Image (cartoon, rainbow, N blue to C red):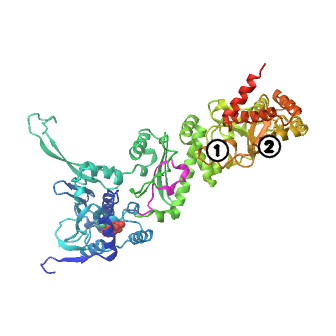
Amino acid sequence: MSDKVKRETLEFQAETRQLLDLMVHSIYTNREIFLRELISNCSDAIDKVRFAALTDSSLLGDDKDFAISLEPDEKKGTLAVVDNGIGMTYQEVIDNLGTIARSGTRSFLEQLKQSGQTPDGELIGQFGVGFYSAFMVAEQVTVLTQKAGGKTGVKWESTADGSYTVEEYDKGSRGTKVILKLKPEFRGQDKDGDNFTDRQTLQGLVKKYSDYIRYPIRMAFISEKKPLDKDGKEVKDAPAAPVVEVKTLNSMVPLWAKPKTEIKREEYNQLYKEMFHDWEDPLEVLHSRLEGSVEYANLLFIPARAPFDFYNRELKSGIRLYSRNVFVMSDCSELLPDYLGFVRGLVDSPDFSLNISREILQHSKQLKTIGKNLEKAVLKALENMLKTDKPKYNKFWAEFGRAIKIGIYHDYGAREKLQELLLFHTSKSGDDAVTLADYVGRMPEKQKAIYYATGKDAASIARLPQMEGLRDRDVEVLYLYDRVDEFVIDALREYKGKKFQSISRGDLDLSDLTGDDDQRQAAEKLQESNKSLLKAIKDTLGEKVAEVRISSRLKDSAVCLVSSDQGISLSMEKIFQEMNQSFFKARRILEINPGHDLFAALNRLYELSPKSDEFRDFCFLLYDQALLIEGILPDDPVKFANQVARLMAAAK
Ligand code: ADP
């Protein structure tokens, strides 16, 4: 070997140049991920040297204190990331840092080309682009490295302008030091920008992205301190002097990798609050590990409270993906079905590489398997909670019940399991809502259907005329208060072979409850004998109603409006109306109580003259009343009020 130190300037391979260009011009906002990428390279390099030392212990020499260090320098505007890992030889530096060996990177570039995305696209963050991400924040990168067991080191340097230099360099110790000359906006010169020479910032980033790296990530903190006397007390008069204190920034052992028995609930709570920025402890913690064809650990949390805008925004998954303790991505929505969007937590699986893209992830079989397991685990935990700790479940239900309901009509496959988790107040439940199993369990044998009613609250449902017949027969009725409830019932159609029956829809046949058919037959008879009257009312009301008939569900009230079994219900119509979709209309059926005095009065008017204004007015009044009971305004409220006023004025 000649005495002259070898030095070359080399061109980057075409693809690398492309990638570098992307990095340099990236306006991607999440540039801080560069640190995660560099630290994870360090961690890999230490893994490698430890592995190599298994067969050749001389590789380590005296240096067995495996560690990663961050060395920021505010004055120079640099940040160095240092490890005592395997290091690289001259040729390895050229191979690894001058070309792209990773198949992943190639596919990343392909994807970028195909999608026509600009470099600021989310892809960068999702993908992670390894070493080259350093150029998002640095104008120049210098790498000093020495292979374990090697005699001399190498210096690599580039400003990402298409070429780089490599030269032999006397480093003196094993491992790699990556020195970033930060762009001005990242070294504290831009007030609003990130300052990657700031120790607090770096500490925060390590906590966020690399807390669970298995090797200590150290940084020196310098503070002015007064010297201590022999008792350990500060010497008051002495001048303060700079004291260097090296701190380990990461906690190294991930909580989820520890055995459950060694973890206190408080530790879980702490991690949850830190990671997910919540101030309240989670309601439930699910921690488990699986080894087999797929290998992973999961740590999931059910929060105690829904975020205030939980139901109004696009659900973002709160599941993070880790691979061997290193953060891969947040919001990994592929891991849980949408309806479990309230679950927070993480999955750590060695089956995923750090640089996996979302696109590849979506097609991953392992991910699907893990996802299925997690869904099962969460549902099982909820079932358990429901069985063993109802007050706690009630709390859950108040916060996230609607998510479960949405799952029922969005996720066909989950329906069977989810229906067991539903809670309803009923005409007999009091404050403590019951499950469908509770309801069916105490249903009299002769009852064939599960009855339900919709309304604002218990009091307004209890006042519904349609409730009269059921109350009379002591039938339990589910109360649906939430606007999505009826859609849930509609999606379920039946529970354990019992059909759901709205008290305000279709032909409410209560004969099975009384055991005899008398009432029904009586109603049918009246229907027949009053045929012409009913037809006259229908003709008067015209298109407003689809049918006018004798009611078998009313007891004290004169009329009620029901909707047919087909199509949507009146309450659904109201919801659609609020959503400005008024083209969905329920088929309205006006039911009249034949036992009411009003029915007799109507009959009299009809006998006198079916064409009179009075009969006509009565018909409309009747219809408007029925609308009001349903909480729907009469079509012409002024006219309605005038008609009532006229009637009142005529009173004797
Ligand atoms: P990846 O780490 O995903 O392979 P990178 O672009 O981050 O891709 O790095 C390219 C290669 O450079 C690595 O595979 C590794 O061989 C080498 N390398 C990077 N950083 C280090 C380091 N700190 N120590 C040793 N080798 C490194």
Please tell me which residue lies in front, 480 or 599.
Answer: 599
Visible in this render: residue 196? yes
Instruction: Tell me where residue 118 sits by quadrant.
Output: bottom left
Residue 648 position in % (x across, y down): 74, 23
The residue shown at (59%, 43%) is: 578
Taking depth in this image into account, of 37 and 88 the one nearest to the observer is 37
Q: Secondary structure at mark 1?
A: loop
* Camera-nearest residue between 18 and 203: 18
Q: Is mark 2 within 8 Å of ligand 1?
A: no
* Residue 392 locus on image (x, y percent): 54, 36
Q: Amino acid at mark 1?
A: Glu
- 251 horizontally vs 546: left or right: left
Is 487 situated left or right of 525 in this image?
A: left
Q: Circle 2 is placed at which residue position? A: 547
Q: Secondary structure at mark 2?
A: strand
Mark 2 or mark 1, earlier in chain: 1
